[in-house]
Amino acid sequence: MTASAVPALKMQRRSLYPGWFYAPAAAVYSVLFLAPTFASLYFSLTRWTLFDATFIGFDNFAQFFREPFLIQGLVNTVIYAVITSGLKVVIGMALAVMLTSQIMARGYLRSVIFFPVLVSTIGVGMTFTVLMHPTLGMINQTLAMIGIQGPGWLVDPKLALFSVALVDVWKGVGLATVIYIAGLVAIPKDYYEAARIDGATKLQNFFYVTLPLSRPATATVITLSFIGGLRTFDLIWAMTKGGPGFASDTVASVIYKQYQAGFYGLSTAGNVVLFILIAVLVVPLTMFLNRKQGHE
Amino acid sequence: MRSRASMFGGIAAIAATFVVFVIPFLFIILMAFKDKQQSALRDFSWPNGFHLFDNLYEVIKTRNWMMITAFINSSLITVVSVTLLIVLAAMVGFVLARRKTRWNGLIEFLILAGLMIPPAVVPTIWLLQGLKLFGTLHGMILIQVAYNLPFSIILYRAFIATIPRELDEAAVIDGARPLDVFFRIILPLLWPVTVTNIVVQSVGIFNDFTNPLYYLPGNQNATVQLTLYNFQSQFSTAYNLLFTNILLITIPPLIVFMFFNRQIVAGMTAGAVKG
């Protein structure tokens, strides 16, 4: 190969994977996502009317941690994310174990469990609002038939957030299930074979083979549903609008309410709080979930 | 004995999932067949008469045929933004998978950040207003592209990494020009992951409520998710119409589900199995 051929080849290789392929995506992403994210750091420190912004330091954040209803929104967000991701892990795993076993009507079961994932969240929220009505709702009417007085799912301030979380699980558990199914199917059969030779019971099989080896799936389910739970807005808005009172407000619904009320600086501070909340909780969580096992 | 136990378990599972997952959908369908009076009872009963077509007509013509506008808007937003997403994400995924430079780390960080960070709403509105894109379909489309790029890029990059590099070099030796390598050799090979992308992203964008709520205000800009609020008022809700509306907007995802079930599951579980 002659000396001049080397740079020519190099140049050709470079243009085979041209850097400008990044350009259109980078332009849209930087202008419409990154720029507002950076701008939010400044505007969260201002009193803002969209036309002019007055710098007020950390007043918005101070207000966020002073007003009881804003603090409640923050606490609710974490509770909501923990409940929904916890239930999705447990139920999703159970359903996946069931669906990978020799059970009849597997196709039917898989379809009905997964389909709600694809349905409009607002539609689901409105349907369950009707079903959860304290007196006319189908759920409490059914409970009344067997002599149980059902609770006021969405009107009891102590219960509203949990009721919405349950509907979230109803809608989202299908995704957790298919992720777990993909994880379970990938476990080599040899492990179960070895466990069988050692005389493991079904329960031991689950706790010593299935559970540790489906860890990547667990990490994905927890991360996805935890981030989703922290950011949740549409289901809460469709069902309770944060009520009764502020009982089921989350940071995302607070952001919308402050925006509607014209408190743009405070709303943007809410965005920054949510961003920090996600970073503080999710980054260590994913690091913990994805850490290598001791012997590796 | 054992098979009888597993059969019993199977029947129990079918019954339980029927109650939990199927009954709510049957409820929606039954409500859509009822008239206003009967639907106000909100019970799980057989419709007194066949009112589905009356309800459909009523739902579609409400507020000056808003449903038609909404379906056109939602379809436009979905089709155009998914098309853009596919082209842009495939280009990024290709170069990101093939060319290792010191920028790769930063780019991957930005992709993960896009999956995690909630969009800063009011600054985005302020920016869209400055660009004269606030409340326009163009603006909404670009927002959907920006917000959904990270997920599409991840799908493409993972898939492209499985296509051997030798293919690119062979094409060059056979005389393909550099751009041909991507557009005529690689892009056609990406078809399976492109289908996955189309299906997953279009369902997500079609069902999106929050972003149109913020960035696309105004009746002439309504999207299908917002039409659900047409029949709810503080004093009375026309339940038959509300549920007819819910039924109507559930049909597109249902069709997608029936034809692309496998691709949806593949796309949504991508990356879950490898550690």
Image: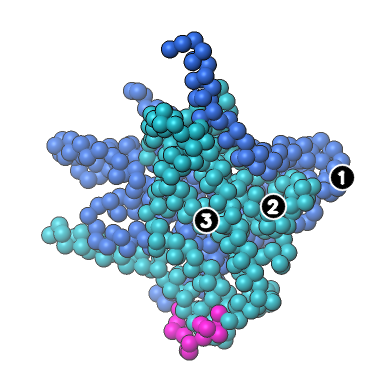
Chain colours: A blue, B cyan
Name the subunit of mark 1: A
- Above/below status of B199 relative to A289: below
Q: Quadrant of residue A22?
A: top right
Dividing the image into 4 quarters, which one contains the C terminus of chain B?
top left
Q: CA distance from mark 3 to mark 1?
A: 38 Å
- Above/below status of B11 relative to A6: below
Q: Residue at x 31, y 44 (%)?
A: A184
Q: Which mark is residue B139?
A: 2
Camera-side mark, 3 or 1: 3
Which three-letter amino acid code belongs to the residue tagged 1?
Asp
**Dot 3 and dot 1 residues touching (CB under 8 Å):** no
Name the subunit of mark 2: B
Q: Which mark is residue A37?
A: none
Camera-side mark, 2 or 1: 2
Compare residues A3 and B101 and report the one nearer the observer.
A3
Q: Quadrant of residue B13?
A: bottom left
User: Where in the figure is residue B51, as x and y percent of width and height?
Assistant: 51, 86
Q: Residue at x 51, y 72 (%)?
A: B247
Q: Say if labels 2 and 1 share a chain.
A: no
What residue is pinned by disc 3?
B202
Badge 1 marks a residue whose secondary structure is: loop
Stretch of the chain drawn in magenta: B41-56
Q: Does residue B50 belong to the magenta stretch?
A: yes
Q: Residue at x 17, y 38 (%)?
A: A193
What residue is pinned by disc 1?
A52
Q: Say if labels 3 and 1 share a chain.
A: no
User: Where in the figure is residue A206, as x and y percent of width and height?
Assistant: 28, 43
Badge 2 marks a residue whose secondary structure is: helix
Name the subunit of mark 3: B
Which three-letter amino acid code belongs to the residue tagged 3?
Ser
